[in-house]
């Protein structure tokens, strides 16, 4: 990746793939905030509606990337982050199922699908 200013994901502004995923993630955080991660379940309400992407990342124990790094290192870090997101979303999906919360289950299934596609693309990139 060329040097210069990078966004929170460690890519140059204008990196279409990563920018698209970043905005999808921001939309997802908004959806979680609106839904309260199960509006009918008061113990869990607000569990994910923690005040934005920074707080959600902290609660999920996601580490911010250092920069600059070689492009392949960024891709490997994104791969690991997406694999963690799939595992976390699967736990949330299962918890929502046990709590009889189909809306949150659907939200998590959509996230799992998106991150699985991202994992496939990142692995394809690394295989080159």
Image (cartoon, rainbow, N blue to C red):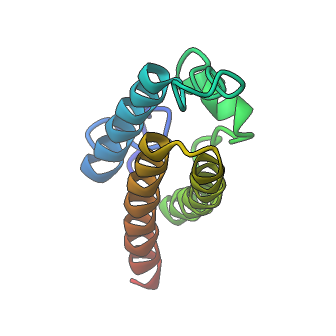
The residue that appears at 51% across and 24% down in the rendered structure is 39
Is 2 displayed left or right of 33 in the figure?
left
- Residue drawn at the location 38% of the way across and 54% of the way down: 110
In the image, residue 65 sits, relative to residue 111, either above or below, namely above
Q: Which residue is at 50% across, 33% downward?
A: 8
For residue 12, side relative to residue 14 (left or right) = right
Residue 28, quarter of picture: top left
Q: Position of residue 11 (x, y in %)?
A: 42, 44
Expressed as whole percent of the image width and height from the top left, the position of residue 92 reads: 62, 49
The image shows a total of numbered marks equal to 0
> Which quadrant of the figure contains the C terminus?
bottom left
Q: Is residue 55 left or right of residue 115?
A: right
Above or below: residue 80 compared with residue 50: below
User: Residue reaching furthest bottom?
Assistant: 127
Residue 12, by quadrant, is top left
Residue 80, position as x, y percentages in the image: 62, 62
In the image, 126 versus 48, the foreground residue is 48
Give above or below for 74 relative to 33. Answer: below
Image location (x, y in percent) of residue 36:
52, 23
Q: Determine the residue positioned at 54% across, 56% down.
A: 78
In the rendered image, the vertical position of residue 82 relative to residue 26, given as above or below: below
State the residue in front, 18 or 60.
60
């Amino acid at each position: 990746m060329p040097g210069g200013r990078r966004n929170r994901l460690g890519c140059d502004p204008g990196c279409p793939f990563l920018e698209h995923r970043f905005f999808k993630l921001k939309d997802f955080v908004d959806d979680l905030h609106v839904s309260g991660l199960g509006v009918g379940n008061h113990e869990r309400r607000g569990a994910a509606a923690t005040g934005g992407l920074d707080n959600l990342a902290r609660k999920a124990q996601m580490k911010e990337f250092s920069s600059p790094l070689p492009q392949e290192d960024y891709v490997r870090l994104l791969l690991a982050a997406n694999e963690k997101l799939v595992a976390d979303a699967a736990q949330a999906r299962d918890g929502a199922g046990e709590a009889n919360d189909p809306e949150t289950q659907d939200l998590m299934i959509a996230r799992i699908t998106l991150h699985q596609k991202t994992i496939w693309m990142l692995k394809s990139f690394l295989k080159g």
